[in-house]
Image (tube, rainbow, N blue to C red):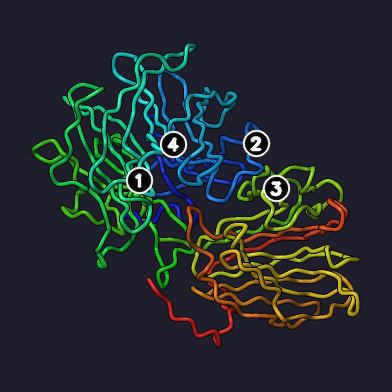
């Protein structure tokens, strides 16, 4: 028995691949770097973060929120791993400025080649390796002339040839159904047909998986008469919502498994973002793909003959900043490196060089990890000696540049070094009317999250003191999920100050969460 989601927290647009006895899943990373996270498993039950494909090969600075790295697809052929992905520069209607790239490597862990530009006609590329040795690139087609807000008009295909690139005509093989918003194409060969899996209905509540098929690779493709084959739309009995963006893998014992994304909303808000789950699928007598449960909604538990049943363990993450940065960390449009998050200057500490504000799309010196749990506690120990109100450092809950909660140390002209909080909710900024005067450094900072609220605390002595409790449902929406991190800003002089962190700890359901918060568990 495998409990879904297998990859909790922000892990959207999963693409699954099997090579021998190894299973891999690639997920979208959007503005977070390193990008294109790869997970590995040998039994589909136990997954580990193995590597990240994108590091400094691409520049994301300046890209708006919810853009950048979309829907990577990994494939394998004749000893070579392939990865195609989209870098989105802009989504302001009516246009979608995006570039599709291809990278290759002899191993899933690299070294990966420099991204090779392919096209810009749409997003969500995938590369299909046919039995005759030919390769085909598929992607969603965007048409700015379309009157509806979403301007996806189906799926196009073009042949790709090694050392030459895209060749031959561009063929539109699917125009979509009335569910619309057709994207995320994945092509498979099964018996006498080519099967095209697409996502339709958008990535929200209408998200669905639609299947069509053809005996010729370029079509015509017929649509499954009982589409969509997966959707939670209108189904309150579904254990998950927003299910879609499916991709297939055949196991060594000839079972078919579909990876897909889903959400677990709390009071309608998917704070953890879009997560990854697995579902067993079967081919019916007419040759169409169906969920094994006979329904169109997913199962929370996947029944497979794996070695051991899996029960989600409490998340435990601690980085003592001893020698190297834990690979769980991400930067916002910046790869974590010694230029701004340094481990060598003061051994045993992480030094964050102060960057631009939390609302910057360029040099936001934020180091963060995914929120994977509804109930958690995160804590750090920091030393920081600001001398100006424009200097800040601390602990943050961060969805994007328009939505965050920040507990920070700064300087006040009358009170000296103080602890304050700021909030940005859908672009509306508030400097909260809470302030604590601090003694000498260091200072412990902590946030305890309980479903839809977060309690921010601090201490310089033995007892924790609560500074503020805030609702957090606004830390949801868009294409990503909430992150928890540490950061530093100097708006007086870029890199003019720094903060030293002794450790960072994240754990699930700490018993020290204040019962007075009285949060009812949901979902």
Any mark on residue 68, and which?
A: none
Q: Position of residue 265 (x, y in %)?
A: 40, 66
Viewer-nearest residue: 284 or 61: 61
Mark 3 / mark 1, whichever is N-terminal? 1
Q: Is residue 189 left or right of residue 138?
A: left
Q: Position of residue 101 (x, y in %)?
A: 51, 28
Q: Position of residue 193 (x, y in %)?
A: 18, 27
Of marks 1 and 4, the one in the foreground:
1
Mark 2 / mark 1, whichever is N-terminal? 2
Any mark on residue 147, and which?
A: 1
Mark 3 / mark 4, whichever is N-terminal? 4
Separation of disc 3 and disc 1 at Cα? 48 Å
Any mark on residue 59, and which?
A: 2
Separation of disc 1 and disc 4 at Cα? 19 Å
Query: Secondary structure beneath disc 4?
Result: loop
- Circle 4 residues within 10 Å: few <14, some 14–19, many ≥20: many
Of marks 3 and 4, the one in the foreground:
4
Is residue 453 positioned above or below 29 on the image?
A: below
Viewer-nearest residue: 458 or 296: 296
Residue beneath label 4, please? 123
Of marks 2 and 1, the one in the foreground:
1
Quarter of the figure that contains the N terminus: bottom left
Is residue 146 positioned above or below 493 on the image?
A: above
Query: Which quadrant of the figure has residue 258?
Result: top left
Of marks 3 and 2, the one in the foreground:
2
Mark 1 / mark 4, whichever is N-terminal? 4
Q: Is residue 175 left or right of residue 20?
A: left
Query: Secondary structure beneath disc 2?
Result: loop
Mark 4 / mark 2, whichever is N-terminal? 2
Quarter of the figure that contains the C terminus: bottom left
Separation of disc 3 and disc 2 at Cα? 21 Å
């Amino acid at each position: 028995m495998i409990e879904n989601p297998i990859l909790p927290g922000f892990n959207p647009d999963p693409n699954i691949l099997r090579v021998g006895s190894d299973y891999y899943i690639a997920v979208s990373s959007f503005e977070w770097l390193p990008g294109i996270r790869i997970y590995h498993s040998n039994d589909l039950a136990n997954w580990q973060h193995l590597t990240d494909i994108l590091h400094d090969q691409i520049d994301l600075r300046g890209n708006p929120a919810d853009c950048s790295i979309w829907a990577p697809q990994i494939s394998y052929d004749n000893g070579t791993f392939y990865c195609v992905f989209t870098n989105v520069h802009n989504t302001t209607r009516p246009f979608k400025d995006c570039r599709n790239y291809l990278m290759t490597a002899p191993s899933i862990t690299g070294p990966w080649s420099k991204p090779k530009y392919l096209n810009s006609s749409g997003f969500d590329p995938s590369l299909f390796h046919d039995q005759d040795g030919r390769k085909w690139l598929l992607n969603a087609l965007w048409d700015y002339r379309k009157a509806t807000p979403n301007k996806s008009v189906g799926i196009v295909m073009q042949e790709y040839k090694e050392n030459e690139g895209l060749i031959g005509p561009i063929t539109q093989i699917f125009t979509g159904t009335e569910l619309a918003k057709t994207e995320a194409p994945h092509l498979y060969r099964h018996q006498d047909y080519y099967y095209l899996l697409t996502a339709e209905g958008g990535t929200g509540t209408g998200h669905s998986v639609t299947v069509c098929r053809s005996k010729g690779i370029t079509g015509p493709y017929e649509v499954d008469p009982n589409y969509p084959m997966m959707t939670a739309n209108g189904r309150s009995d579904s254990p998950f919502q927003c299910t879609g963006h499916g991709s297939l893998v055949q196991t060594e014992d000839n079972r078919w498994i579909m990876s897909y994304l889903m959400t677990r909303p709390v009071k309608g808000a998917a704070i953890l973002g879009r997560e990854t789950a697995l579902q067993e699928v079967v081919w019916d007598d007419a040759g169409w793909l169906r969920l094994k449960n006979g329904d169109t909604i997913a199962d929370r538990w996947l029944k497979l003959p794996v070695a051991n049943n899996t029960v989600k363990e409490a998340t435990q993450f601690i980085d003592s900043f001893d020698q190297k940065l834990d690979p769980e960390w991400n930067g916002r449009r910046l790869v974590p490196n010694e230029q701004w998050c340094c481990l060598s200057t003061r051994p045993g500490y992480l030094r964050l060089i102060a960057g631009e504000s939390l609302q910057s799309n360029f040099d936001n010196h934020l180091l963060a990890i995914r929120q994977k749990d509804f109930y958690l506690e995160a804590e750090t120990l920091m030393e920081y000696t600001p001398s100006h109100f424009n200097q800040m450092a601390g602990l943050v809950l961060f969805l994007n540049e328009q939505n965050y909660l920040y507990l920070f140390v700064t300087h006040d002209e009358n009170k000296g070094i103080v602890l304050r909080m700021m909030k940005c909710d859908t672009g509306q900024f508030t400097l909260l009317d809470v302030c604590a005067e601090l003694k000498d450094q260091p200072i412990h900072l902590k946030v305890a999250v309980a479903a839809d609220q977060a309690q921010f605390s601090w201490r310089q002595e033995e007892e924790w003191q609560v500074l503020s409790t805030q609702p957090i449902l606004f830390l949801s929406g868009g294409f990503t999920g909430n992150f928890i991190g540490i950061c530093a800003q100097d708006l007086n002089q870029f890199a003019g100050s720094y903060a030293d962190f002794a450790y960072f700890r994240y754990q699930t359901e700490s018993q020290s969460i204040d019962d007075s918060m009285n949060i009812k568990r949901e979902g």
